[in-house]
Each structure stands twice: as C-alpha cells, then as structure tokens.
Image (cartoon, rainbow, N blue to C red):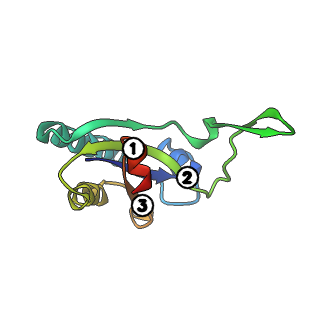
Amino acid sequence: MKYMILSYASQQDYDGMAGKDTGKAAWTEADFAAMGAFMEKFNADLAESGELVETRGLAAPVLTRRIGSKDGESVVTDGPYAETQEVLAGYWIVECDSFDRAVEIASRLGDTPAPESVRTTAYADIRPVVEGRDDLIG
C-alpha cells in the first residue's frame, strides 16, 4: 500500500533556513548542508529499498496563492498563512508492506540535522493513499 508522509514548517522556519533573523537560533551553512545531506541519504535509502514512489519539497508559504469563492466568483489571496502557522513543507510517497513500516520510515526524519529549536517542534503525518473510491468507504 502507498502512504504519504507529510512534513511541516512555518514561514519563520523557511526564513531561518535562508539565514534571516527570526528571533530563534539561526541556521548556519553547516546546519543547512547537514540537512541536505541527510535528506539525500534518506531518499537514496528509500529508492534503494524500492519503497520511494515520489518526494518533493515545497516553496515557502509566502509564495502560496489560495483560490476560494465568494458570491459565486473566484477569489485569490496571497500568502494566506500567518508567520507562526505551520503548513505543508514537503512530502514523500512510499510504497511499503504496512502502516507500521511507513511509521518506521517517517520516524527516521526525527534524526534530521537542524537547530535544536527546530528539531524539538518538528513532526510528520503519515496517511494512507487512496487508490479508488472503495478505499474512501473503508
């Protein structure tokens, strides 16, 4: 079965990775390089095991556009997220034998190098991927 592992970050987290002053411990170039190397190895390990289907990181929340409707007309808003609100930062789709295995894979993300203030608040969600209408019924 396929599972989606979702990771989250705030605009403040993206700003910190870009070296901007966020009032929290700043990311250093070494922190950022270590995180990149960890993610490359994490992805390579999943590809080697045959469990990686797809993975992508997402641009900063400030670049988001939200489409809604009001009075039957489309409404577009820029950057709808408050700075402290966490949003989807990236995802992995893995295909593995069980939900427990997907949890085990996602748990490795807890070892991602980052400033301690980021590590202590980081989390991921894991959700089964629906393959058809019958999966929605349960």
Nearer the N terminus, badge 2 or badge 3? 2
Q: CA distance from mark 1 to mark 3?
A: 14 Å
Number of the front mark, 2 or 1: 1
Q: Quadrant of the C terminus?
A: bottom left
Asked whether 75 or 30 is in front, the reply is 75
Is 66 placed left or right of 49 in the picture? right
In x, y percent, where is residue 37? Answer: 25, 41
Residue 87 appears in the rendering: yes
Residue in the picture at 37% in, 46% down? 129
The kind of secondary structure element at disc 1 is strand
Q: Which residue is mark 2?
A: 10
Q: Are marks 2 and 1 in contact (CB under 8 Å)?
A: no
- CA–CA distance between discs 2 and 3? 10 Å
Q: Which mark is residue 91?
A: 1
Residue at far left of view:
49
Residue that carries the numbered disc 3 in the rendered image: 122
Position of 20 with respect to 58 (left or right) is: right
Q: Amino acid at mark 2?
A: Ser
Q: Residue at x 47, y 52 (%)?
A: 8
Q: Amino acid at mark 1?
A: Tyr
Is residue 9 or residue 119 the one in the foreground?
9
Q: Which mark is residue 106?
A: none
- Secondary structure at badge 3 equals loop
**Residue 45 vs residue 109: left or right?**
left
